[in-house]
Structures are given as C-alpha cells and as structure tokens.
Amino acid sequence: MKTKIGMIAAAVCAASQTFAISSAFANDLFISEYVEGSSYNKALEFYNPADTAVDLSSAGYQLARYSNGTTTPAYISLSGTVPAKGTFVIAHTSAATAIQNVANQLSGSISHNGDDAYVLFKNGSPVDSFGQVGVDPGSAWGSGTSSTVNNTLRRSTSTTSGDPIYNDAFNPASEWQGAGNDAFDDLGSFVGSGGGSGGGSGGTGGGSTVCNDPYTPIHEVQGSGAATPLTGELAVEGIVTHDVQTDLGGFYVQSAIGEEDADASTSEGVFVYTGTSPQSVNIGDRVRVVATPAESFGLTQLGAVSSVTVCASNQTLPAATPVSLPFAAADSAEAYEGMLVSFSGLTVNEVYNLGRYGEVTLSNGRRMIPTQVAAPGAAANAVAAQNALNKIILDDASTIQNPAVIPFPAPELTASNTLRVGDTVSMAEGVMHYAYSEYRVFPVSGLQFFESNPRTIAPSLTAQGNLNIASFNVLNFFNTLNMRGANTTEEFNRQKDKIVAALSTLNADIIGLMEIENDGYNNNSSIKELVDALDQADPGYNWAYINPGVSAIGTDQIAVGLIYRSSVVTPTGGAQILDSGNSPKDGNGNPLFLDTKNRPTLAQKFTLNANGQSVVVAVNHLKSKGSACDDVGDPDVGDLQGNCNVTRTNAAQAVGTWLNAQYPSDAVLVIGDMNAYAKEDPIMALAGNGYTELFEHFNKTDAYSYVFNGESGQLDHALGNTALVGKVVDITEWHINTDEPKVLDYNTEFKTASQVNSLYAPDAYRSSDHDPVVISLDL
C-alpha cells in the first residue's frame, strides 16, 4: 500500500548553473508525469529507473519551482521512498481525492500554472527539468494536446533519464504526450511501474488449460499478508462472482463452496485483470484462469492472462461474507479482498465525491473530526487511528468521471432524490476491492439506502426567544464573475436563488456572513445585491446591511458581513473592525491579530426595537487549516489542528481581549467560521477570555457544521460572554449543506444538459459547504 507523507518545508540553496547531460544521470529520478488541472488539481510524478529504492531525504533530492519566468526558486523538500522501477507522486494538499489517493507527499507549494518551471535537484545539482527557467512563455509552453496549461502531460515511455539543462528551450511535444484536463487515471504508474510484485515461489498447476487439472487455490495466491507470496505463471479455478471488464478491465473469481481453507486471514477471492483483452465469462461460471499473480497498487490480482477456460456454467455462488466495522486492524480487510461480502446498517459519512467519482464513504455511525471530540495531540491522534479502521468506500465500479447517471441512490441522484451523510445503507452482495489506497465495495445485489437523516424544511429550535441571530458561510458569493464564485450569469443567479432560499428560511433577525465578496458597500456590491434579493424573498422586514464606512474590510477577496431586519433591530453606534492595526499585542509588542492571514472581525451593537434591549454581534472568519503559514513560523505540527493553528489562536485571543475592552458591559455574541473544531486552541483561547461555546453550554455534543474527508465537526461556532449566556434560550444548526452531495450545488460545469436541470433546485440544500448556525435570545 502507498503511504501519504505530509509536507516538510525547508529551504536549501543550490547553485544556478548549466550542466551537460552525461551517463551519470542514467539512474537518477526524472519527472514522468505533470498534472495541471482545474482548481488545485496539481501534481508531479517522478520515476526511479534504478534497480534499488531511493530514499529522497538521504539521497539529497529537492524540487524547485520557478514561477512566471523568475530565476529565483521556491524550494520544496521531498521526503519518502521511491521503489526500484517505481514512482513517487507529490500533489497539492487540496487536490481531488483521486489524486490524493495516489499521492506519496502533499504540499501546498505544488501550485503551478502553465507558465511555471520545475527543476529536480540531487545534492544541489540538477538532474531533470520541466519548462525553461528564466523564461515566461505567457500562459503556457506548447499548444494543443502538448500545452502545459489545463492538461496532463506524460513523458515518453522511452525516456531513461532527465534533462538537467534547465534553461534551454522547452518544447513539450518533443518528449511529452497530452492526456487532457483533469486526466489523472494513470498517475502513479509509468511503463507498468507502481505496484511492484511479491516474492516467493510459484503455485501448483503450471500453465495447464485443462479443467480439473491440478491448480493453485485462490487462498494460496492471496496468502495471509498484504501481498501475494507467489510468482510465475499458474492456474486457478473458481466461480465468477462479478464482471467489471467494461469498466475496470477485469472480473472476480472466488473459491467454490467446499474449496475454501480454514484460515480466516486468507481471502478466497481474486481480481483477474484482462485489460484490453476481455474474456467471455458470466456470473456463475466456473473458470480456469492461467495467469501470473502480482500486486497492482496494493491489490493482489492475476495479470498477464494467457487463457480463461469456462469449465461449467450456472454454478452456485459462494455466500457473501458479512463485514462489520470498525476493522480490528489496518490490514483486516485484506482477508476479504476480491470476495463477495455483505453489510447492514452502515452510515453514510461522505458524499462529496458522489457526483464526480461515484463514491460514498461508509462507517459504523458518524465519525467525528478527532479534535471535535478529543484534545489535540495524543488523544486526537488516537481518535484518528480508530476512525481510520472505521471506513470503507461504496464505489460504482466505474472509472468514468462525472457520469451522466449518478447511480446512488437508485434509480439516480437528483435534486429531490438525494443521499445524505447520516443516511444508512445495507447490501446483500458486493465485491471487496482495493484501489487508490482505499478498500472499496462494488455492489452486486441488494443495495438499499435508508433515509435516516432526512432533510428538514427549517431550523429546529426547541425554545424561542424574541431575537434570532444566525451565522452563515455563503461560499464565495461574488457578483463579480470568474473570481472565486460563479463563472457565468446563469451560475450566479442559481447561486443567489439558493443562498436567498436558505437565508429567508433561517427566520433570523441578524445574520453574520462569511465569504462574501469584499467589494464594498455601494449599489453594485455583492452584499447590496444579496440584501435586495433577500428583501424580496422575505418581505416586510426591510432588510439592510452594516456599512462600516470603509471601501473594503481588509485586503482579502472575501470578507465578513452583517445583515439585519431593520424592522426588528436598529444598529447602535458605529461598526467596529478588528485588524492588525488595532490588535492587542503579544509579549514582544507584535499584533496578535494578523489581517494578512485572518479576515478582519466586524462587530456591531444592535438594539431590539420592541423593548430597547441590546446585544453586540461580532462576526469572524479565521485563517484556514489548508493553506500554509510557514512564512510566519506556524506550520502543521502534527497535533491534528492543521496549518496556522498559532495564527488562529492568537487571533481568537485578540478577538476576546478586544471585545472585552470595546464592550465591557454589553452582552456579546461571537459567531463565525473559526476554522477550528470544538477542542482546539482557538476555542480554548476564547474560553479563557470569558466566552462560553453555546453548543457545549446546552450539552449538544453531536454538533457539526462541516464534513471533511468523511469526518464531521464544528468549524462554525457561537460563543457568548457572561452577560449574554443567560439570555440564550436555544441554539441549533440547520444541516442543509455539508450532509448533501456537492454536485447538487449551483455550478453547471461537468454536468450534462439534463443534469444541469435535474441536479439543481432553487432551494436551500447545498447552497454552501457549511451549515448555518441559529441562536435564539430572550432580550
């Protein structure tokens, strides 16, 4: 199996000089694949042509990226091992799951566009290059199928060494073949490399094609370990249980009833890879397969098939083996690889890739983000280890991306026939498979979904006060097209309809917004357009927005905002902004709040029109976990709080200190996307300043507003000071977004003309990627 290796940041200088090609480079790594796809789909693949494995760190390899024609490199340290005659993939930390699943190292610095060059150094000397250092080609080198922008390029399989002369003219067409945009099905494989083969001796049966001649039992092919112990051509016999030759180039065979062994650690099924030479087999056939066992990216399979003979038809299939989660150990599922399995009552934990890849993550119950339920560090890592055992992928067994029919749930996914995180699943028969570093089940029969987490038409509050306040991340609401949100007018109108449907149904009198375009407050601004649309959808309340008297809040493209029903509340005094300029200082006199990382905080006091009571609302959006803070010495330290934890924690400390100084006698509500889960340091910092997390106050331990990598947790919080907590009567989240498939959003790309309509509805569901939070106060 491949292991994902986290980014290790370092800066090492190498002399800039030109080297002549010599035979000394013949056994050095070289770049074998280049992926420049949509969004963060960026990756490089290296190939090791040598007969021995390479430890990247000890061998002194380092990657340098030269952006937009610069001669000043950004260095990316490499860490891990490249097998002999094998590959190594480094990819962006936010790349598509299909890329991350084959990546050996993730780095936010793998962020090239078509005009960026790379040089691979070994001990300070270049051994290969991509592009031409010191030259800005405009948007890309090459054109058409060999362009370096929006394209995957694969090196000629005749390549045996790299190009160390990194400042000579670069023509990708001379040595690279284009595969198109977002094509990464071959990533991790070069000239047949990638999986490696097992060692040991061959089985019995030789290459005889005669049915019932001696043959090697399937459980001996599988063995009790992760890799087959056998090599060389051999024969097996078994029952065909599933045929995926059209989609995956192979079929499955399993030992016939009575031919199994007594060892529970050895699988009785195996995948037969037929590739471009499909065989005429049917489910229930007893077949004799003459082939060679090997490992393909962690999957034991029979490849190099020389013959498939049907010995009998309509045979009784082996009974499906029940599988339960969590697995006892990381390799426990290996015992079922290639076999018919069944399960019942598993919970859907992730539907993000349902529309793109036909994948659904299943677990025993809902898995929580480790730092949502445990302290960062050892305790959270222990939860993460348990979560890793409690997971399996339900897969449609197709390599087609963005299928015209999304098969889950039957008959197909639509805007009204959804599949949500929290729903449950049972399956009578499926085949266990391993690919992209995950165990997967391909359904065969009896797949059923149960609506265990149905949609709700509005937020549910068990108690109702006289003022409701909400927090909502509106996911890049930009009326400036082709920025971070909608690309076309059609997409923007679809996005606006969904956001307005959600906001108008919240029944909130004040709403804090995150990720709205930071384009000011005039009549053409995004916040103005949103409020005008909301005023039409939710009439009678005279919706308005807070204008803090600046042209923009901070310098980021996105900002926080406050909108309100002017018929219910009235702003009292001017809005206040917390940024680096007025931030409380640390012990060295430096601002705790960095507005180059965090979005500035916006605070406003409101008075309830009905009785003159008041509340202060402070809306926040702290630095994300995914982007790096290495420039301020704040990397991911492995305690599961991600990148920039100190930056967020200092900001939270600043927010609490600043609010206490600005509003010493007021009831203050802190809301927003803190990019921190419930047990993480930023939430603890606010608690230290006297702010109580309101979900915890109401003992709502199952709270979540975000799903990431099949785990649920709170990024969106509501906290109150002592003067506010007694006024809160209830708090809830409205789970309209993070439980829903991403493909149900407003976007039109990667959808058929029919899906543009069938997967969209102008309702609240999947209007964003975060769930809104609603707090009810009795002032």
Image: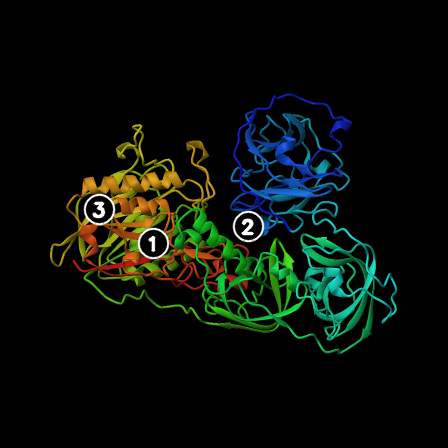
Specify the amino acid type for callout 2: Ala
Extreme front residue here? 262
Residue 281 pos. (x, y %):
77, 70
Q: In this rendering, would 642 be left or right of 462?
A: right
Q: In this rendering, is residue 214 above or below 751?
A: below
- Judge by depth and name the residue closer to the eye, 358 or 372: 372
Dot 2 crowding, Cα within 10 Å, few <14, some 14–19, many 20+: many
Q: In this rendering, is residue 683 above or below 240?
A: above
Specify the amino acid type for callout 3: Gln
Mark 2 / mark 1, whichever is N-terminal: 2
Q: In this rendering, is residue 472 above or below 314?
A: above
Residue at image mark 1: 472
- The CA span between labels 2 and 3 is 39 Å
Mark 2 / mark 3, whichever is N-terminal: 2
> Mark 3: which secondary structure?
strand
Residue 774 pos. (x, y %):
29, 59
**Which mark, by number, is residue 604?**
3
Q: In this rendering, would 52 be left or right of 735?
A: right
- The CA span between labels 2 and 1 is 25 Å
Residue 65 pos. (x, y %):
57, 32
**Which mark, by number, is residue 96?**
2
Residue 546 pos. (x, y %):
24, 47
Residue 576 seen from this side: no
